[in-house]
Amino acid sequence: MSEFNDASIVEINEVMSAANSAASVMKKLSLAKRAELMNAIADGLENSGDELIQLVMSETNLPDARLRGERGRTIFQLRSYAKACVKGDWLEASIDTAIPDKVPPKPDIRKMLVPLGPVVVFGSSNFPFAYSTAGGDTASAFAAGCPVIVKAHPAHPKTSDAVAQIIHQAVKQCVLPAGVFSHVHGVSFEVGKSLVLHPHTKAVGFTGSYSGGKALFDLANQREEPIPVFAEMGSVNPVFLLPEKITSDPEGIAASYAGSITLGVGQFCTNPGLIIGIKSESLDAFKMTLGSQIKSMAPGNMLHGGIAKAYAEKRATALAQTNVDLLSNTSSDSSELQGLPTIATTSGENFLRNKLLHQEVFGPYSLVVECNNYEEMLAVASSLEGQLTTTIMATDNDIKNHTFLVDILTDKCGRMIMNGVPTGVEVCLSMHHGGPFPSTTDSRFTSVGADAIKRFARPVCYQNFPDHLLPSELQNQNPLSINRRVNDEIKASSIS
Amino acid sequence: MSEFNDASIVEINEVMSAANSAASVMKKLSLAKRAELMNAIADGLENSGDELIQLVMSETNLPDARLRGERGRTIFQLRSYAKACVKGDWLEASIDTAIPDKVPPKPDIRKMLVPLGPVVVFGSSNFPFAYSTAGGDTASAFAAGCPVIVKAHPAHPKTSDAVAQIIHQAVKQCVLPAGVFSHVHGVSFEVGKSLVLHPHTKAVGFTGSYSGGKALFDLANQREEPIPVFAEMGSVNPVFLLPEKITSDPEGIAASYAGSITLGVGQFCTNPGLIIGIKSESLDAFKMTLGSQIKSMAPGNMLHGGIAKAYAEKRATALAQTNVDLLSNTSSDSSELQGLPTIATTSGENFLRNKLLHQEVFGPYSLVVECNNYEEMLAVASSLEGQLTTTIMATDNDIKNHTFLVDILTDKCGRMIMNGVPTGVEVCLSMHHGGPFPSTTDSRFTSVGADAIKRFARPVCYQNFPDHLLPSELQNQNPLSINRRVNDEIKASSIS
């Protein structure tokens, strides 16, 4: 499949050794210097022109406009995380000044986040720019002050190589040690395994399947020194249609969901794979419109043959379940590489009985679950596993009448959307892209937005240090003008 | 040993079921109501009088003054975390307002931390108040909005029961469901195992030994749904004596360390168990003073027979190692229950060769490592595992001449102390009581100070919610007047 060789153990040792040496340099880099590196990578991407887009298209089957948009998003991530890095709120700098006449005397105590060390990043197949080589995990790790080792995704090794060249160039331009960033290839699971088990590795970022992410998580916990794994492993992103809302506009809601389900041939971790409603004429109208819209959707090429095959198989298995009915699929002919837009239906009772129906079918597929009543809808909500998102289509009255549902759903997800679609993940500080297991391996951290930086850092506390020996972030003068909690109050001023 | 029965599986199921129901109530409790509960427990402890102190003395052999001080500390923790809970900085509330004319439109996105759910707490033997039943973990979990299930420490079951009664009373007084707090006994590991494996358990707090903490961590990761375990597992807390500093006052430093090593019969997780210096006349003078001071120290009763026996065995094993010399121990007679204050010495070379010498000897024991030169001291520093604390005894000149040592030590610990002793952990926001594995299972969180609340919470993001349906913490008016990041700027004002 690939013209690249899997990294050997010797190569992995060399790479990790270089990363380990670079870690000592990186942790002393000023926030501004880290931002310089990130902006240099952004510049490189900006200058990568049509040629790179062509290359990525050839490896991913993603259309030109999508890839240009995604490259733009990747540049935005790098620049906005660089800005957040310099702003320094993520450092959680905190200062308690001494109280010498307390009994016993209170010493001067200050803390801030420091980098964990070398971070191994496993990019995703579905975001060749934004969650791959120079994507969100790499940007977060650099901002935190950690060297990065990227294992190229075997579905787009040339893309990964080309982006890695841009990063290497930026590292050189910033006069940093080469070990700040390394790039290895590996089709075999052994390469990833060796990277995660390497003693110099201090954290792992991953975006992909449950089986892949969970395997790395387990390996990391079995190490002599366990390390954190931030695996974003996808989700079915359930959507709840409440009675008054669905009655108000069944066709409009159906149309927006037909779009969301098939966006990017359904290859988003936030794709709405489950739609739950209560039997009614409005729900019938919703189904009818959704069915007819899906029928008219052209099938699209999926990222690669492997994903298309997996989709075809999972779709077939889902449709073969007892009491699961095909509502509609595209009427166009399709090739083996294409994902067939598909809507199936089942009853609430059947969904509760059959756990297989709770699983993600990665592609342009969604299952409409028709409940007999609100109690059954609550049972369905309660039966769900952890999700990246849940969506509620509801009027104010609906919410008033279904507060218990909202409570249950809050426990099930990382992001709740009101009257929208789950696809489209805004890159901003308030975003939380994460969620309870099994959507991720660590519900406490986001992989989108600058708070993602915190994944790769830990607090260190300095007790009784003379001012000039403290990191500048914690010095009295506050030379970086960052926000700090000083004796419990947040301020950006200096300490007199 | 105990007059209490180990909790049965039936009892554990009942307790966890009650906690699970209470979790739905607790997560909707206002911050003020959580604080009310915590302050009611503090009140109860304040009113617990001499009787409770007598009871704890009888179970722990800890002296009256120490226990009164520790009870005071526990009350302070409850009240100060309650204050932090209401202040709300820990919620990390964040708001990005909508930008409708952006392409694509940016939705309104807000996030804050929400409680994880039922937290199982394993208290420590050495802090019967402050890190046990109503200790730091319980206070943090309540502040986060989580029900708590405490497994009583088998070394002080009556103490745990008495404190549990105070908490039950406070729960009743605040008119909260009984499941908010549960208390079970268990001498057998099976009780702890069942609690950690129970599907309703969402997080675990632990303070104790490496073997105990690591076993719970492994169990938690092997669950179908892995959950976070915050285990504080102790440390040898290395102290580095730099040349100019030790020359300036070898006797004074020795005296303060003789006190720190034997404080509380050495039964603190921050006890300085390792002192590293470079061979010199000053180091000899330091050793001589330390040796003679330790010789004159009276042995003290340890917490219980098991700890005394373990100390005697580990001490004997350490002293039996090749090239480990006994520098001095107490000259008094001692009973089986007593811990013998002891100082041993070895060479840097021998320390590097023998990993057993890196292990904690829990009790009034410390090992002085004499290095041939600075290079050997660096090698010793590099060879250390993760620690709660490291201490540097140094002048400004020493630091200038030994920057590489400071860099290495930052990577090894959660707290660095300059010219002090590691014992004494201030309860304040800037404290970090934690550290790289194996001192804890999660270096990213503290178990002391109000930031400990964050261990038991995770972010949830609300997208496109009408203002009145948002939690009050995130509403435009900011009715709780908490700090929030609004479009990247921290402010406590309302949004117009």
Image (spheres, coloured by chain):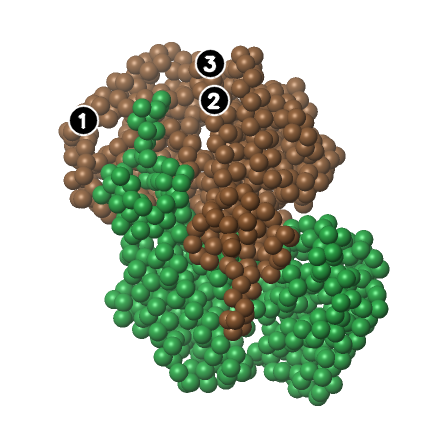
Chain colours: A green, B brown
Other residues around mark 3 within 10 Å, as few (<14) / some (14–19) / many (≥20): some
Q: Do the residues labelled 3 and 1 touch (CB within 8 Å)?
A: no
Name the residue located 25 percent from the left edge and 66 percent from the top edge. A175
Where's residue A211, x and y in %? 60, 62
Q: At label 1, which amino acid type do we have?
A: Asp
Where's residue B486, x and y in %? 47, 55
Q: Mark 2 lies on which chain?
A: B
Q: At label 3, which amino acid type do we have?
A: Asp
Q: Could you say which disc has been placed on residue B249 in the image? A: 1
Question: Is B54 placed above or below B373 here?
Answer: above
Tell me the SS state at disc 3. Answer: helix
Tell me the residue that label 2 is attached to: B72
Q: Which of B224 and A406 is in front in this view?
A: A406
Question: Is B319 placed above or below B26 here?
Answer: above
- Which quarter of the rendering shows the C terminus of chain A? top left
Where's residue A134, x and y in %? 42, 69
Tell me the SS state at disc 1. Answer: loop
Res A461 → quadrant: top left
Tell me the residue that label 3 is attached to: B64
